[in-house]
Amino acid sequence: MNSKTPPPDDDSAQAKDPQFAYTLAKGLEVLRAFDVSTPYLGNRELAKRTGLTRPTVARLTRTLALLGYLSYDKADARYRLAASCLSFGYPLLSQLNVRHLARAPMQELADYARGAVSIAMRSGLEMIIVESCVDQSAPNGRPDIGATRPIESTALGYAYYSAAGATEKAELELQLQQAQGPNWPALKAQLTLAQSFFSQNGYCFRVAAPNSLEVVAVPLRSNFEGEVLVINCAVASFNLEPNGLIEQIAPRLKHLVALVESAAGLR
């Protein structure tokens, strides 16, 4: 089953909505099943990922291919996303004014930190990168626009959770509980700690692994009413002095957010 957006069950709001278009939802699940590690998928693999039957998947992939959203490789009998899918995101990206206002200070911070600075917005249980700047000498590659990060294990996700309103937080917790199963109590405890730290300091941080990446994240208001973005700075541990993330990077990232929000008229 594709874990990005679980299909509606019998008790979900969608299942009770007479205007909910199940066929459309299934087609979108097929498109969402592709990812960076598996850009080519056959009908059997898509059926396994989406939980749909193979005949249903075959009809959907045929339709999506005829509409230009999938390309079919006859030699391999597999599909990949077509260029038409890229056009969906452009109108959204072009309207996010904070991306343009933030780009110069983001690059300045990335160069200072010798790391990467990215803006992300929520989609389901993931944060999607919508802007990114990286120091040219950084050892890690640039996080591409459209790349995803899981909410449950990243500074981006923790900062988003901490900044969310009560209603959205409850909805997010329910989705995470359903996705995490028996791991939910441990994750809930981590989120509670992150929320407490955020309330005192205005940011969240995560260390990806010992001697690996250290990441700090701060919520960022957007020009879309009610839409909260998150901006992070990721730095290789060996590029940081002891406590450098807390003492040097976090204050600069908070200052960057204040500058961008002021320039956008959001504070």
Image (tube, rainbow, N blue to C red):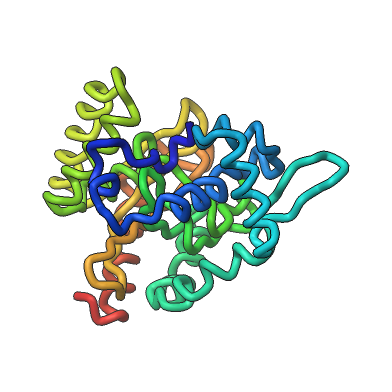
- Percent coordinates x, y for residue 45 in the rendering: 64, 32
Name the quadrant containing residue 136: bottom right
Q: Is residue 115 visible?
A: no
Query: If the image is split into quadrants, where does the C terminus sit?
Result: bottom left
Q: Compare residues 261 and 149 and report the one nearer the observer.
A: 149
In the rendered view, tell whether residue 226 sits above or below residue 55. Answer: below
Q: Is residue 149 visible?
A: yes
Q: Compare residues 152 and 8 and report the one nearer the observer.
A: 8
Q: How many marks?
A: 0
- Percent coordinates x, y for residue 121 in the rendering: 38, 57
- Percent coordinates x, y for residue 126 in the rendering: 40, 46
Which residue occupies 42% across, 60% down? Answer: 119
Q: Compare residues 150 and 214 and report the one nearer the observer.
A: 150
Name the quadrant containing residue 37: top right
- Percent coordinates x, y for residue 60 in the rendering: 59, 49
User: Does 56 sit left or right of 259 as displayed?
Assistant: right
User: Does 180 sit left or right of 104 as displayed?
Assistant: left
In the rendered view, tell whether residue 79 sits above or below residue 21. Answer: above
For this orientation, the residue located farthest to the right is 75
In the rendered view, tell whether residue 206 sits above or below residue 18. Answer: above
Name the quadrant containing residue 158: top left
Which residue occupies 60% across, 44% down? Answer: 34
Which residue occupies 48% across, 75% down? Answer: 91
Which residue occupies 15% across, 54% down? Answer: 165
